[in-house]
Image: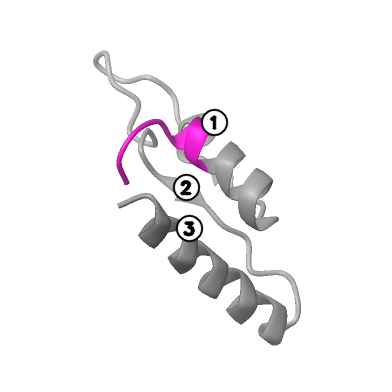
Amino acid sequence: MEGNDTDFARDLFTLYNVTVLPGSYLARDSHGTNPGARRIRMALVAEPAECVEAAQRIVQFVKSRT
């Protein structure tokens, strides 16, 4: 993932209505870096069809950023 995980999560929600959590929110700084930075966390708790739709939207979002 390029850029900031927080910006990525915010933009994904704003543009594609998909909610993910920035990885840096779930990790602690260690030796000056955050191991969760530049990652996202997803919870696949919806029905399978809804999870597939969200995954497709994430792919579209990532492609739109390149």
**Three-letter code, disc 2:** Ile
Q: Compare marks 1 and 3 and give the one earlier in the sequence.
A: 1
Question: Residue pushed farthest left?
Answer: 31
Residue at the disc numbered 2: 40
Q: Earlier in the sequence, mark 2 or mark 1?
A: 1
Q: Is residue 8 above or below residue 63?
A: above
Mark 1 → mark 3, Cα distance in angstroms: 21 Å
Instruction: Give the labeled residue for mark 3.
Output: 61
**Pointer 1 residue:** 25
Which of the pair 64/55 is nearer the observer? 64
Q: Residues within 10 Å of mark 1 (few under 14, many from 20)?
A: some
- Whether pointer 2 and pointer 1 mark residues with C-beta atoms closer than 8 Å, the reply is no
- Magenta highlight range: 1-8
Residue type at mark 1 is: Tyr
Specify whether residue 4 is painted magenta. Answer: yes
- The image shows residue 9 at horizontal and vertical percentages of 55, 42
Q: Mark 3: which amino acid?
A: Phe
Q: Residue furthest top?
A: 32
Secondary structure found at label 1? helix
